[in-house]
Image (spheres, grey):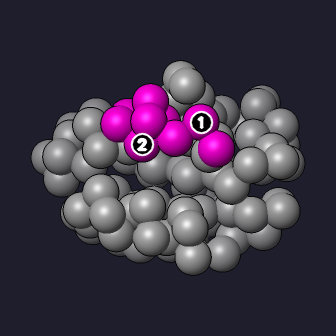
Amino acid sequence: MAVFNVTKENFTEIRNSAKPVLLDFYADWCGPCRMVSPLVDEIAEEHSEFTVGKVNVDEQPELAVAFGVSSIPMLTVIKNGAVTAHAVGIRPKSAILDMLNG
């Protein structure tokens, strides 16, 4: 499954997914973000039971503010339209999957 580029224009559709949603808030210049990004890509590829999206905080400041992003990378899980988990900083793939399955 592909990773969605999440924007304010398609956010409602992503948020309302029937599947649990993983959002990766990142910036191109962020070193730790570049370490987390391949893990997020792997999860999207290996787990079709999740909707996975990436939010570039420089290009989508409204979404960053709405989610209270103060540090990146920030991972957020949404289930049934509500935030159920979030984590800031580098996380191993197993911890990201635990967030999604929790």
| Residue 75 location, quadrant | bottom left
Image position, residue 28 (x, y; %): 28, 34
Front residue (pair 90, 19): 19
Image position, residue 27 (x, y; %): 34, 41
Could you tell me how many numbered marks the image carries? 2
Q: Which residues are magenta?
A: 41-49
The quarter in which the C terminus is drawn is: bottom right
Front residue (pair 84, 31): 84
- What residue is at 65 percent from the left and 33 percent from the top? 7
Q: Quickly name the residue at label 1.
A: 48
> Which SS type dominates the magenta stretch?
helix
Measured along the vertical axis of the image, is residue 45 above or below residue 97? above
Q: Quickly name the residue at label 2.
A: 43
Looking at the picture, which amino acid does disc 1 mark? Ser
- What residue is at 31 percent from the left and 63 percent from the top? 94
Secondary structure state at the residue bearing disc 2:
helix
Image position, residue 68 (x, y; %): 56, 70
